[in-house]
Structure formats: structure tokens, C-alpha cells
Amino acid sequence: MTESRKIRRAGPLTFHGEAIPETTTDQRLLDRRGPAEWVHTDPWRVMRIQSEFVEGFGLLSEVGQAVSVFGSARTRPDSPHYTLGETVGAKLAGAGYTVITGGGPGMMEAANKGAQKAGGTSIGLGIELPFEQSLNEYIDIGVTFRYFFVRKTMFVKYSQAFVVMPGGFGTLDELFEAITLVQTGKVTRFPVVLVGTAFWGGLRDWIRKNLLEEGLISPGDPDIMYLTDDPDDVVSIIRDAHVNLARKDAEAETENGT
Ligand SMILES: CC(C)=CCNc1ncnc2c1ncn2[C@@H]1O[C@H](COP(=O)(O)O)[C@@H](O)[C@H]1O
């Protein structure tokens, strides 16, 4: 009679005889501490980046129609821009849009406050910064990201329009990212509305004069941005754009016979 060979199953793996490892997977995980430098390596960072995407997608995928509102972190509550931001947040919420901001102070707080007070859903996608910073107090659902680029993906993926209030470098970065995505066809259904004609008019003129006249952008490109001072306009521009897109979708479906 042959002696039966030893066998060890480790998850989907099966080991026989000499091939059986001396320790189990759990022992190797739990018994050893080992060096810790690997938590500062890029492969480990990739895992962390992945987990931010997983958390963000998980949290935001069930949010309905939403609009991201950008603007200065430095605007004070007694500024007319802050009041305008609050009204824009309230009007968007009144029209059924969830309001998403960067979760910080200033214009972000204004839009969150307006949305929350109007009974809408107010979301803050915060970012870890070198100085102490917490999400503003008018947020129903908040996430704080480590990585700017992960957070930016969330703004684009989970909102159907961008509203850009007066702001500095951060706001300009978000504005130019949005219009570049529209210009290059990476997003196809995305109105970008700038609020504050006195503030933004100069930039649009500069874009027309310097970029368009030099042939650095196409003739239709400046029109990617809508400019207004009126919070009601903000809502109607976004709504009309979405109605037009829905109609185009329906026409395309009819043409394709689907
Ligand atoms: C007081 C202070 C400077 C706080 C900064 N705290 C912040 N918290 C969250 N998002 C931010 C912050 N700073 C910049 N951002 C991002 O960049 C934009 C504002 O930058 P800026 O103030 O315009 O250039 C916001 O739309 C936001 O998405």
C-alpha cells in the first residue's frame, strides 16, 4: 500500500509533499513586521490612489444630477461674491441639482450653504493641504482626497455642469481643465458657466484677442464658456443644455433605429 502524500490547500493553490511551504499565508502576514520603507514607494502609492478612486466612485455613484461649483477659497462671507455664490447654490438646489464643491471656505462654502439651506444635497470633495484645513460646515456628504487628480476626476465624472465663480489659481485650473476636456471632446455634455461678467469678461476678451486671433484655438472655442451675472440664468443655461443633449440623443437613437 502506498503512503498517502501530504497535501496543503492555500486559497486556490494546492501543494503536495515537498512543495508544501513551511508556514501558512496567515503566519507570513501576521508574524513578521519587516521593513517599513515600502509604504513610501510608488507601487504602494498606486494602491492608495486606487483606494481613493474606489471610495470616491462608491460614494458618488448614487448621487443624482449634480453641478460642481468652483470659486475662491478666500472670499469672505461679507463679500457680494459670497452672497452671489449662496444664491447660485440655492437656485441649483431648487432646480433639483446636487451641489458639489471643493468643500473648503469662501465661494465653496457659499455654494454649499445656499444649497443646504434650500433643502438640496450639498457635497464637499476636500483636498489634503499642507496647512490645517477642514470641510466647511454646510456639507451633507464629504470626502477628503489626498490626490488632486483623483478629486478632479470626481468633479467631472459626477457632475453634469461646471459653474465657475470668481477665484484665483485653483479656480482657473479647474476652469481650464473643464474647457480643455470639452474642446478635446473628452466630455461631450458639459456646460461651463462663468458667473460674474465684470470679473470674467476680461479673460474672455483676452482669449478672443490673443488666442483666437493668433489661431491658437478654433473659432467656436470661446463659446464653450457661458458668461452671466444672473443666478436664474445659470440654472436655465444648464437646463437648456441638458434638454438639448437629451433631444440630440433621442434623434440619434431614431436615426440608428434603436
Ligand atoms: C484659506 C485657503 C487658502 C484654503 C484652501 N482650501 C481649499 N480647500 C478646498 N479646495 C480648495 C482649497 N484651495 C483651493 N481649492 C480648490 O481650488 C479652487 C479655489 O482655488 P483659488 O482660491 O481660486 O486659488 C476651489 O474650487 C477648490 O476646488
Image (cartoon, rainbow, N blue to C red):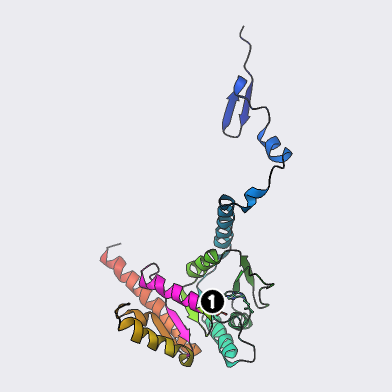
Q: Find residue 168 and report its horizontal and vertical position in percent.
A: 53, 81
At x 58%, y 93%, the residue is 80
Asked whether residue 97 is in view, the answer is no
At x 60%, y 72%, the residue is 124
Disc 1 C-beta below 8 A from ligand 1:
yes
Along the line of sight, the residue nearer the viewer: 197 or 176 = 176
At x 49%, y 79%, the residue is 172
Q: Indicate the quadrant containing the N terminus: top left, top right, bottom left or bottom right.
A: top right
In the rendered structure, which segment of residues is drawn in magenta? 172-196
Amino acid at pointer 1: Gly
**Quadrant position of residue 19:** top right
Q: Find residue 74 and report its horizontal and vertical position in percent.
A: 61, 83
At x 46%, y 76%, the residue is 161
Along the line of sight, the residue nearer the viewer: 32 or 195 = 32
Left or right of 154 in this view: 240: left
Q: Mark 1 points at which residue?
A: 170
**Quadrant position of residue 93:** bottom right
Q: Residue furthest toward the top? A: 1
Q: Badge 1: how crowded within 10 Å, few (<14), some, or many (20+)?
A: few
Left or right of 20 in this view: 210: left
Q: Is residue 127 above or below residue 16?
A: below
Q: Find residue 121 and report its horizontal and vertical position in percent.
A: 59, 75
Question: How many circles with numbers are drawn on the protein?
Answer: 1
Helix or strand or loop: what does disc 1 sit on?
helix
Q: Is 177 colored magenta in this rendering? A: yes
